[in-house]
Image (cartoon, rainbow, N blue to C red):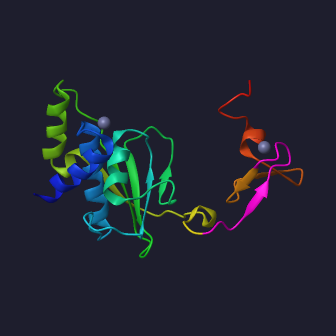
Amino acid sequence: MSTIDILLQKAKEFHGEICPGIVMGTRMTIAGMRELDMDPLLKTQDLIVYVEIDRCATDAIQAITGVSLGHRSLKFMNYGKFAATFINTQTGKAVRVSALPKNSDQPKDMKEVAKMICNAPEEEIFKIQKVHVDIPKEDLPGFPTHKDVCSRCGEGIMDSKEIIIEGKAVCKNCAQGSYYTII
Ligand SMILES: [Zn+2]
Ligand SMILES: [Zn+2]
């Protein structure tokens, strides 16, 4: 089996199917890791990935590389863009791979689209940029460096995510409004 087939298989096991997004995420991972001199077939602890979308491609990146939110090696930036930045924490090298806008004459059948993305020359589907990422200290994997308690709701806050208002720690839910309302 070729490298891409092995990686697609891994992504399929995690995601459930090989859809266009999975092929895209798999190729993004191959491109990103190559630029960092890393092998996508080998497990590594030295990779952090910032993803810019919560869609299929992200599952491929997670399944292949093993990065995860729980390990703090997967960072989610909610930009709605098929893009991801791969960072080799050993060398500090970082590369952002983003999908180029699709041309309009795409086939309707999703299997055909997946095949097309699979076979397309890399420069036709991706923009690749060398970038620099300052990962905030408190966002790195490892033991928490700081914990606090919200002065309004009394809930614990990890990793310096509190906001100081009038000298007191306030969680983001209380300070900025939350995604939920209590009923
Ligand atoms: Zn999918
Ligand atoms: Zn609070």
| The C terminus - image quarter | top right
**For the point 63% across and 64% down, which residue is it?**
138
Q: Measured along the vertical axis of the image, is residue 116 above or below residue 180?
A: below
Residue 45 sits in quarter: bottom left
Q: Is residue 38 above or below residue 84?
A: below
The answer to whether residue 54 is left or right of residue 19 is: right
Could you say where residue 24 lies in the image, as x and y percent from the top left? 27, 44
Relative depth, front residue between 61 and 1:
1
Rendering quarter of residue 172? top right
5 on left or right of 84: left
Q: What residue span does the magenta drawing correspond to? A: 143-155
In the rendered view, tell whether residue 30 sits above or below residue 55.
below
Residue nearest the observer in this picture, 44 or 53: 44
Where ligand 1 lies, by image quadrant?
top left
Question: Residue at (37%, 59%) from the top-left corner?
Answer: 66
Q: Dividing the image into 4 quarters, which one contains the N terminus?
A: bottom left
User: What residue is rendered at 47% in x and 64% in y?
Assistant: 132
Residue 11 picture location, percent across and down: 28, 48
